[in-house]
Image (cartoon, rainbow, N blue to C red):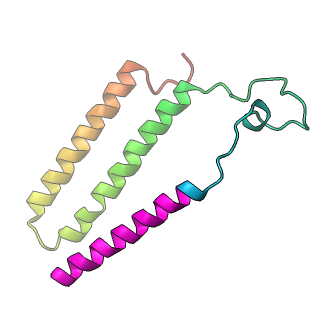
Amino acid sequence: MKILLLNFTIAVTISSALIFISTLLSKKPILDREKSSPFECGFDPKNTSRIPFSIRFFLIAIVFLIFDIEISILLPLGIISNYSPPLVWSMVGGAFLLVVTWGLYYEWLEGTLDWIT
């Protein structure tokens, strides 16, 4: 145990020293207006570099992520079905699906899933 702690301390010390030395010796970039603006053949940009973002698209993407994570949570239920009684894992899976379905129903009633409003 002492050898492991000693090796860990040495590794942290060496990596911290290397990070500190590299920040001291690195060249600091000089920020100016041309370097921080988007490149358009050497001319000043005509438009802003920011594109308007649709909040509806963002909300639909969040709903997709929730259901994607739901699938990854429900997949192990098939593996544990051999090790636990069917009533237990079906009730756990059913309760989880019920909560997610209630959330989807709430979003539907709220109008989050309507693309054009």
- Residue drawn at x 51%, y 32% is 58
Question: How many numbered callouts?
Answer: 0
In the rendered view, does 57 fall on the left or right side of 112?
Answer: right
How far from the left and from the top, in percent, is residue 57? 55, 31
How far from the left and from the top, in percent, is residue 79? 24, 70
* Magenta span includes 21: yes
Q: Quadrant of the C terminus?
A: top right
Q: Residue furthest bottom?
A: 3
How far from the left and from the top, in percent, is residue 55? 53, 25
Q: Between residues 92 and 87, which one lies in front from this camera angle?
A: 92
Above or below, comparing residue 20 to residue 98 in the picture: below
Q: Quadrant of the N terminus?
A: bottom left
Q: Residue furthest top?
A: 117
Above or below, comparing residue 6 to residue 38 in the picture: below
- Residue drawn at x 40%, y 71% is 14
In the rendered view, does 10 fall on the left or right side of 30?
Answer: left
- Residue drawn at x 85%, y 23% is 46
In the rendered view, does 102 fall on the left or right side of 68?
Answer: left
Extent of the magenta region: 1-23
In the rendered view, does 38 fall on the left or right side of 96?
Answer: right
Q: Between residues 52 and 61, which one lies in front from this camera angle?
A: 52
**Overall secondary structure of the magenta stretch?**
helix
Q: Between residues 10 and 66, which one lies in front from this camera angle?
A: 10
How far from the left and from the top, in percent, is residue 77? 23, 62
* Magenta span includes 98: no
- Residue drawn at x 42%, y 68% is 15
